[in-house]
Image (cartoon, grey):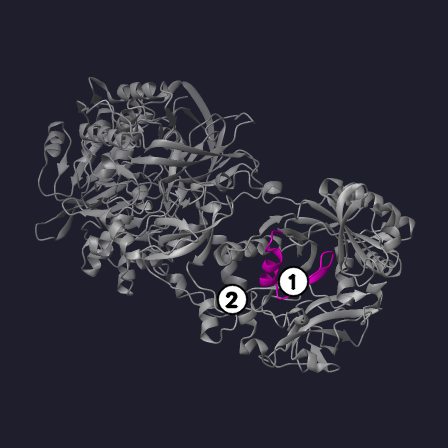
Amino acid sequence: MLLITCPYCGPRPEIEFAARGEAHVARCAPDATGDAIADFLYFRANTKGYLAECWRHVSGCGRFFNAVRHTVTDKFVTTYKVDDPRPDLAALVAEETAR
Amino acid sequence: MTASLRTPQGGRIDRSKPLRFTFDGVSYTGHQGDTLASALVANGVRLLGRSFKYHRPRGLVAAGTEEPNALVTVIRDAGRTTPNLPATAVELYDGLVAESQNRWPSLKWDIGALNGIGSPLFVSGFYYKTFMWPKSFWKKVYEPQIRAAAGFGKAPKAADPDRYANRFAHCDVLVVGAGPAGLAAALAAAEAGAKVILCDENAELGGSLLSDASATIEGRSGRDWSADVLMNLALKDNVTVLPRTTAFGYYQDNAVGLLERITDHMSDPASHLPRERLWQVRAKRVVICAGALERPLVFPENDRPGIMLADAARTYLNRFGALPGRRAVVFTATDSAYAAAIDLKAAGVHVAVIADLRPKASAAAEAARAAGIRVELSTVINATHGKLAVEKVQLARVSPSGAVAPTETIACDLVLHSAGFTPTVSLFSQSRGKLVFDEARGVFLPGAAHEDNASAGACNGTADLSACLNEGYAVGAAAARAVGRTTLGDKTFAAEGLAIEIGGHFGEVPHARDATRVKCFVDIQHDVTAKDIRLATREGFRSIEHVKRFTTTGMATDQGKSSNMNALAIAAGHMGLNVPQVGLTTFRRPYTPVSFGAFAGSNRGDLFDPLRKTATHDSAVALGAPFENVGLWKRAWWFPKANEDMHAAVARECKTVRETVGVFDASTLGKIEVVGPDAAEFLHRMYVNPFLKLGVGKCRYGILTRDDGFVYDDGVIGRIAPDRFHVTTTTGGAPRVLAMMEDYLQTEWPDLDVWLTSTTEQWAVVAVQGPKAREVIAPFIEGVDLSNAAFPHMSVVECTIMGVPGRLFRVSFTGELGFELNVPADYGRALWDAVHARVVEFGGCPYGTETMHVLRAEKGYIIVGQDTDGTLTPDDAGVGWAVGKTKGDFVGKAGMSRPDLTGPGRKQIVGLVASDPKVVLDEGAQITPMANPPKGTHALGHVTSAYHSSVLGKGIALAVIEGGRARMGETLYVPMPTGAIAVTVVDPVFYDKEGKRLDA
């Protein structure tokens, strides 16, 4: 029973959350064509390692937020507000390895 | 009458409390403190079961929950029957009724024993190579017979009436296991003021101290010491002690699942008690003191009743005062079994010989000889004999060259064996901790932890009693300090007790038998032998996970607790690899079986899912309406008059609505209040329709697509004020639509000043539809000009309805003049009752969801999720007109412009009529160009909705068909098992094509 730290509510059990998928995926332009649409709709990074993703605290504050999670160990390295920029993954990884 | 093999004194049982119980219909006496197993041992009952595949006679192997053989069914009544319980885990109570399993007609005379004759065919994996021919035999012969033969116990057929509780708990330190290490750890943490939970699967705490009569700790007996510690812990407010509680699963972030057994040991449990309680514990630190389990030796025919682990025999004697036999042969690879031999001899058992696999006499061997017990070195058991129990064994000597030669045969009724002890690393492994292979001793030990836990005692490879106590205390203290408590300082314990031998011998022992035929059992519950494992590696299964699944070793209810290491050693040896190279299989939760009831808790029956009822529900019940489930909602389905069936009721309701008036509960539809300066801009971006210029008091039928361009939901949207919209959704789609709106608002357009509120349950909606609708509602509406000119179709106004503030919509899902009266839900029933009475006065009637479906289908109105399935664009669904042609951006704009979504041959919504008006097509039926399509013919589409229309006097259907709109008038076919139905493609609007009746 994973604990996920909602930036607004603090650590809560995973069943209160819904995963939304990879974070920082730019919505394609309304007049986009071809691969640009397909990339936005259907293609996502399948990283084995640290991934920035978006979650929603559905059974809590209802806010969306972003997180960096290791996709093999399920360890959440950090969570941050949805407007914040993508954190420096390399620096985060270095910090984690040091710990 | 005292059981024949009960010792005159000793043991932890209460000899002043005899208990009566029956096993396979025979009555016996046991005592308070016995398990079913120990009571059967004391009564000389040795045959307890029949093995899984070969139906060989079987008896007890162990004394704890790792017992693989003696699985029984305990029966209280038809609903309280539990199969597959190890007799060692069943606490005896007065009146207990238990039965053996997997035998017919009886344990003694079991017809399944004939499987033994076929055993050369029943090697591992035989079912992958058999039961294939002739093909027809599978369904009629093989499958039924396999089903009858498979499994162990029989599941009860009556519902489980017991109640199961659930509790969440947080603590500083969770200590798993209350043997010496666990007790010391709990003591250390508790003394430091930490909040401690201590759990143990046994009813009595003390672990290995319970079967050790001679241990001393701090100047008193081990048992007295543990009683003192438990008393100390019981008196502390910061400690919760949980006996009969198994830590069955370790989950992420130090969440541990505990199962507390509350009433299973009681003769007559009080009815208010739950049977079990599931604890979901979140601990800051976990201390694992799970101990170690004795490992069997793998030798020929090592499975007969009476052949058991040495430490189990010692436990039966010292803890339960029961003798497992009278004439014993001991076979050992370590010193541990010697203590059992000595204790049993002192209790009057004749120990004929100790066969020691090792070539040199250890100090224990010398001591045994000095005590008058014969010890033979380099000696193995080469064969065992006996029909329903062991009667004699043949010994053999292993020469230095490795040759094995039989020596003598010895009569016995008890064989004790021990290959050494395996640390129990299950819980640690479940926590994703890394195991480390101890080369010197050949066992896996806890290495780097993944969660905040530490291990102590035998499970950590510590064998000596005082070392276990010291380590437990140190680890418990460290855990307390880690959570910020101040400990009392270091502590060491002066203790003397039996040191178990961790490590020892792994795999098969040498023998002089035919290795291709002899049965040396490895996984005794699944009848897996050493040669089965060698077969698996010969067949090319080199991963231990494949060996496990091909042979089923380690897959039984005991999860390989006494077989995994032996299986691993045999597989590794046969492949020429060493044990750490092959590795162990994944340890899975639960550690021991957990009842379904404990996981279900209160989520059963009426409480399994929440039930959603509208404000008018009870009125509909009073009117005799049956209900249909729409998601979690109950919706009135039809309102029968007299003895009408659904067909008659719906036919009448439809006609009444179109000719007069009907009243319908539309409360379940989703409602979202969209408010803010940017409300119009937000809806303009979310929906395909333009919204910026929708006037206040006007409504629009909105289509919602996802960014892939496919229809996702629909609903009427009314503008209440410049900055306020009343958005409706489908009943089932309400939560999805709100979630989608929040998603775009929070992650895509956070700059928009608008906020969303779910109001689905806040508004009750009474729909009045039909030519007389305006006259019916007039008295209820204050201050609104309801004339057609002043309040045209698709209008909305805030007003007073039946004296309360409400919203009046002029909308129609029936195609008739229609209104929807929205009032706060608390007034919904009163409004329904009042409107219903007036409708009836006018000759109208209430109608339900079935009629609602028929009427809308007559008008070609789609239902999202029934006529659409997530693969239709608005144009496919016939609502392409809703898409704003000059909009800059909206959700789905790019998606629906993709060439495949705008090209020819798309499935499009059309209407269908059959030549026979009485025919109603099957929803989901496929549509083909020819009447008798050959197999593999591409279907052009399928029927999405189909009804009998009483108004039109014929069956009608909606369907999606490739290029449907270009096929008007074409004849196609719906192939059915009873014959193909010819259909004509028509306009999906069957009734009032111009929509004149809407503008009445």
Visible in this render: residue B362? yes
Visible in this render: residue B412? no
Front position in the image: B676 or B367: B676
Front position in the image: B895 or B253: B895
Q: Please give the name of the residue rendered at 53% of the width and 28% of the height, measured from the top-left corner.
A: B273
Q: Residue tagged by mark 2?
A: B137
Task: Answer with mark 1 or mark 2, whichever residue precedes in sequence.
Answer: 2
Q: Amino acid at mark 2?
A: Phe
Total tally of numbered discs in the picture: 2
Front position in the image: B514 or B638: B638
Marks 1 and 2, how far apart in space? 66 Å
Q: Residue tagged by mark 1?
A: B691
- The range drawn in magenta is B675-702
Q: Classify residue B561 by image quadrant.
A: top left
Q: Amino acid at mark 1?
A: Phe
Question: At which x and y percent is residue B876?
Answer: 64, 73
The quadrant of the rendering that contains the C terminus of chain B is bottom right
Q: Are marks 1 and 2 on the same chain?
A: yes
Residue neighbourhood size for the residue with mark 2, other residues' Cα within 10 Å, grouped as few (<14), some (14–19), many (≥20): few
Say whether residue B208 is magenta: no
Question: At which x and y percent is residue B50?
Answer: 40, 45
Tag 2 secondary structure: helix
Q: Chain of mark 2?
A: B
The quadrant of the rendering that contains the N terminus of chain B is top left
Question: Compared with residue B732, is residue B599 higher up or lower down, i.e. above or below?
Answer: above
Question: At which x and y percent is residue B285?
Answer: 31, 35
